[in-house]
Image: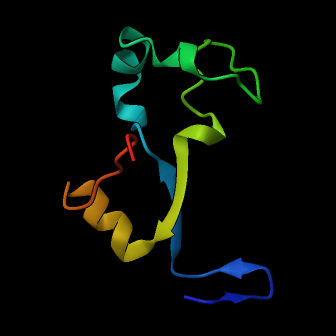
Amino acid sequence: MFANAGRWMGYDAFHIFPLAYKGKWKELGLDKLFDPLIEEPDGYYINSIRNGILLRCDVHRYFDAYEVTIDVDV
């Protein structure tokens, strides 16, 4: 779990709002909340860096299992 020679072992980068729910992303209007750093041809902007997070691999698994969450109101 330490950075070594430019490699981050034991960490995962992933989407906060999953790609599998891309349609719901657009339906909820979340695409309009992001100023895209990179233009996406479909206009969804779900791949925005603001929809990503870096966590340790074990915490990522907890997040995917809904045992850990992100509270945006804090």
Compared to residue 30, the image places residue 68 above or below, namely: below
In this figure, what is the number of numbered marks? Answer: 0
Residue at the (35%, 50%) spot, across then down:
70
Q: Is residue 10 left or right of residue 2?
A: left
Residue at x 20%, y 54% (from the top left corner): 66
Residue at 46 percent of width and 19 percent of height: 30
Quarter that holds the N terminus: bottom right
52 vs 20: above or below? below
Along the viewing direction, whichever of 18 and 28 lies nearer the viewer: 28
Q: Above or below — where is 38 with respect to 29?
A: below
In the image, residue 59 lies at what x, y percent?
A: 35, 70
- Picture quadrant where residue 8 is located: bottom right
Furthest-right residue in view? Answer: 5
Q: Position of residue 43 (x, y in %)?
A: 62, 12
Q: Give the vertical position of 2 relative to 19 (above or below).
A: below
Give the side of residue 31 with respect to residue 28, left or right. Answer: right
> Residue 46: image x %, image y %?
54, 28
Q: Give how far across and how far down residue 52 sits, in percent.
A: 55, 47
Q: How is the image coloured?
A: rainbow
Q: Residue placed at 49% from the left, 52% from the top?
A: 14
